[in-house]
Image (cartoon, grey):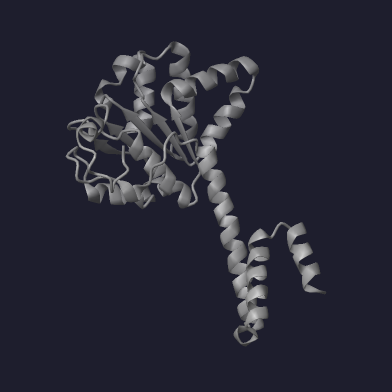
Amino acid sequence: MTIEQTFEKLAAMKFSGMYAALERWWNERSKSPANALDPEELVGLLTDAEWTARENRKLTSRLRRARFPMRARVEEVNYRHPRGLRKQVMLDLVSCRWIAARQNLIISGATGLGKSWLPCALGEKACRDGYSVLYTRCPTIFEELRRAHADGTYANVLKRIAKTHLLIIDDFGSTALEPRERRDLREILEGRYAASSTIVTSQLEPKHWHSFIGDDTVADAICDRLVHNAHRLELAGESMRKLRGLDDSDSDNNES
């Protein structure tokens, strides 16, 4: 089989990583025959290239499906701003061991302290570690479920959410929940309980959640499935956005 036929078959099989690596090797070999690889070395090179290409495509797909509203990476976390964020606690969360253990994370604090940025950074790291992630704001997920009730896809939407390794619900408690929203949230958490992880961000601490959830019985069920096995980040301090508006010198850190 000629090299052209090999390239054609690699393209037909969609082995793009192997195709690119073989093309590079073939061009370099023609320029410097003395640097030719042994057969087992060449097979290893091509296999590694294909593996890396496929893993990169999977990561790109996970990041797209996660629907993060901003670019955030854990390597860019600002530990200098005083807001009660301890580096050792964050490093433990960055390891994703809590996701493997199907635990939750609750981030509370005033606006401007990174309550949305931090879960996006942790979610991006989870994507890199092979976990599926879905980010949503609380009003957005309830609107999606409202449409699912109307078009008959409610069960499918719940199933998709339940299968996601890490669900991020941002801005929980911004408005009081309607009866249907309470029931929907309980269904979501029921399907995820002890099976997957959830991050919830809220300006209010969990002890105040009953006030906007509404029904005490449903609120108890929701809090029980979120809080008892949850890690906590309680942020406090002056808004990072406010200080950044006064001083833009912190250009080496992109956290917002």
Q: In this view of the protein, which residue sits in the foreground, 51 or 28? A: 28
Instruction: State the image quarter where residue 17 is shown.
Output: bottom right
Q: Nearer the viewer, residue 79 or 187?
A: 79
Above or below, 251 against 140 in this view is below
- Which quadrant holds the N terminus? bottom right
Left/right of residue 162 with respect to residue 224 in the rendered view: right
Question: Residue 234: x and y, percent?
Answer: 23, 34
Q: Residue at x 60, y 84 (%)?
A: 35
Q: In the image, what residue occupies the spot 19% across and 41% down?
A: 81
Residue 245 vertical placement versus 255 (above, below) = above
What residue occupies the far front of the structure in this picture? 31
Image quarter hosting the C terminus: top left
Height in image: 83 above or below 185?
below
In the figure, 28 relative to 89: above or below?
below
Which quadrant of the view contains residue 108?
top left
Residue 254 location (% of width, % of height): 32, 43
Residue 31 or 232: which is nearer the viewer?
A: 31
**Going by the picture, which residue comes out furthest to the bottom?**
34
Q: Is residue 95 left or right of residue 83?
A: right
> Where residue 137 sits: x, y (%)?
43, 26
Q: x and y percent of residue 64 in the render? A: 54, 40
Q: Is residue 33 left or right of residue 70?
A: right
